[in-house]
Amino acid sequence: MAGKRTAAPDQRAVTELARQLGALLAELGLTEIEVDLGGARVRLARAPAPPAVAVARGVASAERPVPVADVAPTSAITIEAPMVGTFYRAPSPTAEPYVRDGDVVKEGQVLCIIEAMKLMNEIEAKASGRISRILVENGQPVEYGQPLFLIEPTG
């Protein structure tokens, strides 16, 4: 026998670890995180593009995202993408959106879905309040930590 070989963790465990690390990456504002789990190494990194890149590529100013600080009331809670994926406002193309601007939501209520690696991940409100702005269009790609919703907390 050449050496002891440990079994690698199953794909679900690795995927769940990647999700958790992605959320931690966004929550802590990190640009890179790496973990070794029983022989499987998971490394996530992000490098946000500087604002000048959009201008250099010829994107019209109307198409550039507006910084959250320019539209958010100071008391607004920002719901951010915990992973890279595709943003969907509804559970299917023919269904009604989970929420609309102005809707009152409760903590834990599903706001949208982010599709990542063919898995649909429900994104929930982290506070009760009124949706003051939806910052992403349906079907658009999102990055770690990208603001998705602004919620104005209710008393």
Image (spheres, rainbow, N blue to C red):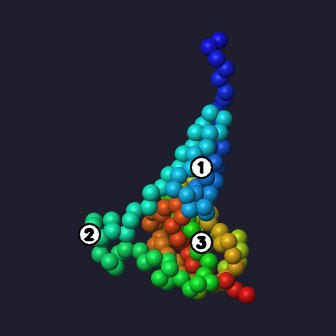
Please identify the quadrant where the N terminus is shown.
top right
State whether residue 94 is above or below residue 85: below
- Residue identified by numbered label 3: 79
State whether residue 36 is above or below residue 32: above
Question: Mark 1 belongs to which amino acid?
Answer: Ala
User: What SS does tag 3 mark?
Assistant: strand
Residue at image position (61%, 43%) is 35
**Closer to the N terminus: mark 3 or mark 2?**
2
Residue at image position (41%, 74%) is 65
> Image check: 82 left or right of 105?
left
Residue at image position (59%, 49%) is 18
Image quadrant assignment for residue 141: bottom left
**Closer to the N terminus: mark 2 or mark 1?**
1
Is residue 40 visible in the rendered image? The answer is yes
Labelled pair 1, 3 in contact (Cβ < 8 Å) = no
Residue farthest toward the top in the current orientation of the protein: 1
The foreground one among 76 and 84 is: 76
The foreground one among 14 and 119 is: 14
The foreground one among 68 and 62 is: 68
Callout 2: few (<14), some (14-19), or many (20+) C-alpha neighbours within 10 Å? few
Question: Mark 3 belongs to which amino acid?
Answer: Ile
Mark linked to residue 18: 1
**Closer to the N terminus: mark 1 or mark 3?**
1
Expressed as whole percent of the image width and height from the top left, the position of residue 61 reads 32, 77
Image quadrant assignment for residue 79: bottom right
Mark linked to residue 58: 2
Rounded to the nearest angstrom, the CA distance separating label 1 from label 3 is 19 Å
How many numbered marks, from 0 up? 3
Please identify the quadrant where the C terminus is shown.
bottom right
User: What SS does tag 1 mark?
Assistant: helix
Labelled pair 3, 2 in contact (Cβ < 8 Å) = no
